[in-house]
Structures are given as C-alpha cells and as structure tokens.
Image (cartoon, rainbow, N blue to C red):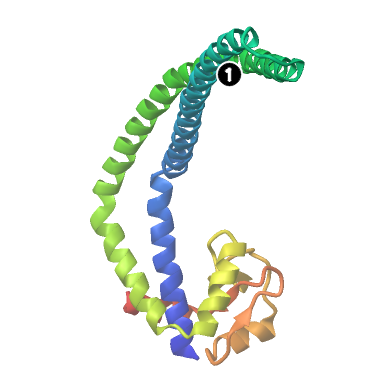
C-alpha cells in the first residue's frame, strides 16, 4: 500500500507541474480552439451560400431554356391549328397551347424566385467574407503566440508527459480511476498531505485517530469532508524520489 500511495502522490506532483504549465498559456488554447471552430463554421456557411447561388442560377437558366422551347412549340401549334381538318384535332392543339402557356407562367415565377434567392445568398456570402478574414487574422496571431509559449516550455512539458506516462503505467488501474475521478471533481487536487492535523485540500481538521492510522501507510484513507486521498509526511518525502 505504501508504494501505491507514493505512486499516486508522485503522479499528483507531476500533474500539478503540468497544470502550472497550462496556466502559463492562460486562455490562449481555448481562444484558439474557439476561433478555429468559428472560422470553420463561417467558411462552411459561406461555401453553402455560394453553392446555393450556383444551383439557383443553374435552375433559373434551365427554366429559361424550357420557356424558349415552350414558346417555339406554341408557335408550331398555332401553325398546325390552321392545318387541322376536325374540331377534335383543333381542340387537342388548343389544349397543348394552353398547357404550354400555363407552364411558361409557372416557370417565369420560378425564375423570379430563383433569382431572388441567388441574390440574397450572394449578398449574405459577401457579408461573411470580411468577418472570416478578420477571424483568420486573429487566429493566426493567437496561434503564433501560443506556439511561442509552447516552444519555450516544450522540453519541460515533454519531460513531464513522459514522467506521467511512466507513473500511470505503474499505478494500479483501480487506484488511477479513483485518483482521476477525485482530481476532476476537486480542481486538480486528488492526493494531499495532512499538515498540522488538517487536510491539505479543504483544510478541515482530520480526527486524531485517522492521523494515527495515516502514519502507518497501510491503507488508503480519504478526507471525511472533501473526499481527497490523504497521505502522511513520510509518503510526501519518499514520493519525490520517484520523480
């Protein structure tokens, strides 16, 4: 159990150092992520609008072409009307002419609608352009700043990450799950020493009996108030040798 406790505290110290490096970056990682998502979203929206413009104009041109064909047919039908010999044939041609004219009216309305849709989509796409450019400039600046910070601490961060991976490989799976759960719930602090008979996490008093048990280093004890894993001074000193 003593070894398990030492490993957990060594892991806690390593994670604390990694957390401090992350704090040096401030809000930059979050800002970069948010700006990247925003640029991606707006660029995609602009592309969708541009596609809508293309498709609307193509549909408009197709409708215009059909109107030209229909008008030609109407002229042809009108010529045929003078050549028919029966009322039945005349009525059939008249129906074709009426249908074609109705179709032309419908297509003309569709063309107006498609042109209006294309115009609005083009306008919206053009409005997005400057905003995307501005966001990309901000993103480039923040990425550059973040890269500079990362480069400055790259060696230290890499060393800590390797150290952490080695420790995690040695920690019992059940212990790591407990550690990880508490760490996420308690602002990064999962394993804390008892100082002056008080919890190093929430600073509430630890009962004398638990302090005595703690010094045996033979069981995993937690704070009755905050639930953090408690360790003795001996574990604190010995764990540092693992780093």
Q: Quadrant of the C terminus?
A: bottom left
Specify the quadrant of the image occupied by residue 198: bottom right
**Picture layout, residue 43 above or below residue 189:** above
Left/right of residue 69 with respect to residue 157 in the rendered view: right
Viewer-proximal residue among 16 and 181:
181
- Residue on which disc 1 sits: 114
Residue 203 % position (x, y): 63, 64
Residue at coordinates 43% horizontally, 48% vertically from top-left? 23
What count of labels does the image hold?
1
**Picture layout, residue 10 above or below residue 19:** below
Query: SS at mark 1?
Result: helix
Left/right of residue 207 with respect to residue 65 in the rendered view: right
Q: Is residue 239 visible?
A: no
Viewer-proximal residue among 241 and 177:
177
Specify the quadrant of the image occupied by residue 137: top left
Viewer-proximal residue among 93 and 206:
93
Residue at coordinates 33% horizontally, 32% vertically from top-left? 140
Residue 32 % position (x, y): 42, 39
Left/right of residue 1 with respect to residue 150 in the rendered view: right
Residue 212 % position (x, y): 61, 87
Q: Is residue 219 visible?
A: yes
Residue at coordinates 57% horizontally, 63% vertically from top-left? 184
Viewer-proximal residue among 49 and 98:
98
Left/right of residue 163 with respect to residue 46 in the rendered view: left
**Picture layout, residue 57 above or below residue 181:** above
- Residue lying farthest front? 85
**Picture layout, residue 166 above or below residue 26:** below
């Amino acid at each position: 159990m003593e070894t398990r406790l030492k490993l957990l505290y060594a892991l806690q110290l390593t994670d604390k150092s990694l957390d401090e490096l992350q704090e040096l970056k401030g809000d930059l990682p979050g800002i970069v992520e948010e700006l990247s998502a925003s640029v991606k979203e707006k660029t995609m929206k602009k592309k969708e609008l541009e596609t809508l413009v293309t498709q609307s104009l193509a549909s408009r041109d197709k409708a215009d072409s059909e109107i030209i064909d229909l008008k030609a047919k109407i002229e042809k039908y009108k010529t045929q009307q003078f050549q028919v010999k029966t009322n039945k044939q005349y009525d059939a041609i008249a129906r074709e002419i009426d249908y074609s004219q109705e179709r032309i009216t419908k297509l003309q309305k569709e063309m107006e609608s498609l042109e209006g849709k294309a115009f609005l989509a083009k306008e919206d796409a053009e409005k997005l352009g400057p905003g995307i450019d501005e966001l990309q400039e901000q993103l480039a600046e923040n990425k550059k700043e973040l890269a500079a910070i990362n480069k400055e601490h790259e060696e230290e961060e890499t060393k800590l990450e390797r150290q952490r991976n080695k420790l995690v490989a040695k920690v019992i799976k059940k212990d790591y799950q407990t550690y990880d759960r508490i760490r996420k719930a308690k602002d990064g602090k999962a394993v804390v020493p008892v100082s002056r008979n008080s919890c190093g996490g929430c600073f509430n008093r630890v009962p004398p009996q638990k302090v005595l048990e703690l010094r045996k280093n033979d069981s995993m004890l937690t704070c009755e108030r905050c639930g953090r894993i408690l360790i003795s001074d001996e574990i604190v000193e010995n764990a540092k040798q693992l780093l």
